Amino acid sequence: MRRSERIVKATVWGLCVCLGGYLAARGYLHLRQSPGTRAQQILGDICMETEREAYLWYMPGIFYEEGTTTPLITKLWTKIENWYPLGMYLKEHQEEEQHPVIEDESTCYEMIHANGNTIADRLLGENQSQAVTRENETARENEENDMSSQQEGEQEKNGNEEEQQERKTDENEPQTTENAGTVTAQLPAWTTAVESTPKIDLSMERLSDFHYLLNNFFVVDPNTTVDGSQINASTFLGDSLTLEEDSSVPQILIYHTHSQEGFADSIEGDEATSVVGVGNYLESILRDIYGYQVIHRKDTFDLMEGQLDRSKAYNYALPVIGQVLEENPTIQVVIDLHRDGVPEGKHLVTEINGKPTAQIMYFNGLSRTVKNGNLDTLPNPYIEDNLSFSFQLSYQAARYYPQLTRCIYLKGYRYNLHVRPRSILLEVGAQTNTVEEAMNAMEPFSVILDKVLKGQ
């Protein structure tokens, strides 16, 4: 029962007691002045009933009966509740609160609790698993070095040292070769993603289990709830999110609701070492390596009149992003790039392609809270599309970079994810990561993004 309802009920009860006392006193005085046979009988009955109720309260064994005996005061209050409409409203409202009409509520809360425990265990074990990952990477590097040494030996014998030296270039620079008068581009080595052994079972049989899917891919914030109608792997993977390749028009938008977020070694005031700098690197990869035309907005929505203010950053960002999309209707992918905030002892880092790489997380708003239900004032017609986009990115990461993605975090509000079907809020590492680790994360992320947009 809410506090306001308890106050109203107590007030009504107090007024009833006062009224009853007043009427009893008036009646008693009237009877004393002009007693009659009927009045004497009524007083006798009242005295007997009062005495009986006193025995019932203090010595119930004397009046033991089969079944439940209701005390007089309870009967009296029940009658008062029935007499007054407000009392009946409070009673019915209380019964609704005690027995809400929610589909399988206990299962829902057990699911969220189990999900939270599973995710907590997984996050605690993230850094511990890094040692094993590094050991495997070291073994792989040693094997590659051995093979390279053997090849170098053979090339030395064949006198091919000069040719080998000419092939060495910076791995992050696209390479070109001439073949019969045609120039073809060679992508950097890190763009060649090799499917690895995933940490979890990705078979559709397992992914069809709602609890398994939820516990291995999602974290549900306590302020919202989800069910099997929203979290369905078959639906997510069945959604086509491919783009028609057209480098002549903008197709991807990158922006930063919280542009002032930085990393462990960021330099204050230096855009290149902030989350905006990470967006610059992602923009260059998508443009120069994959051929997408990208618009990168660097507005400071969280910096108002020189002061950091994130309380209304999403409100400030929406009209600007809306105008960009109105002027560029060909944009179909919208990325709000952030970095997360974690306890200082937490380091969200793994190793990919031999580089220290910040782990990433996707963030989805469901426009629904536990307290208020569906938020009609914050509608999002693309909730399912956004979830499919986040899940397909996570699924590809699970296949090629099992340590890259932390989870898909589900929260209750909207976070401007209603502007396009392929909208994501991307958290790259946290304040404990270095700028280099965050930059490195954009390489594997761009690989899986390209795979999703090409339907691979």
Image: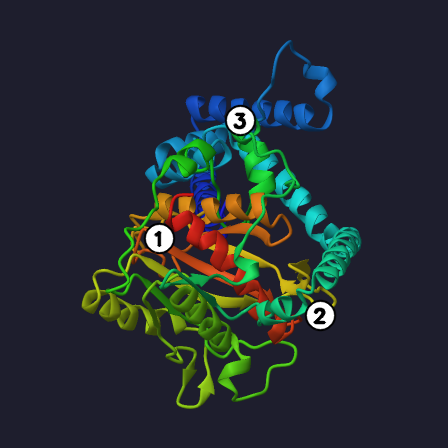
Q: Earlier in the sequence, mark 2 or mark 3?
A: 3
Q: Position of residue 387 (x, y in %)?
A: 42, 46
Gap between marks 2 and 3 measured at Cα: 72 Å
Q: Quadrant of the C terminus?
A: top left
Side of 137 where 352 appears, left or right? left
Compare residues 444 and 425 and report the one nearer the observer: 444
Instruction: Tell me the tag on residue 46.
Output: 3
Q: Where is residue 172, by image quadrant?
A: bottom right
Residue at point 57%, 28% (across, down): 206
Question: What amino acid is found at the position of numbered circle 3 in the picture?
Answer: Ile
Residue beneath disc 1: 422
Reading the image, the residue beneath label 2 is 344
Taking the image as shown, residue 310 lies to the left or right of residue 400, namely left
| Residue type at numbered disc 2 | Glu
Colouring used for the render: rainbow
- SS for callout 2: loop
What is the total number of numbered labels drawn onto the structure image? 3
Work out whether residue 97 or residue 360 is closer to the camera in this orientation and state it.
360
Q: Amino acid at mark 1?
A: Arg
Indicate whether 176 appears above or below 127: below
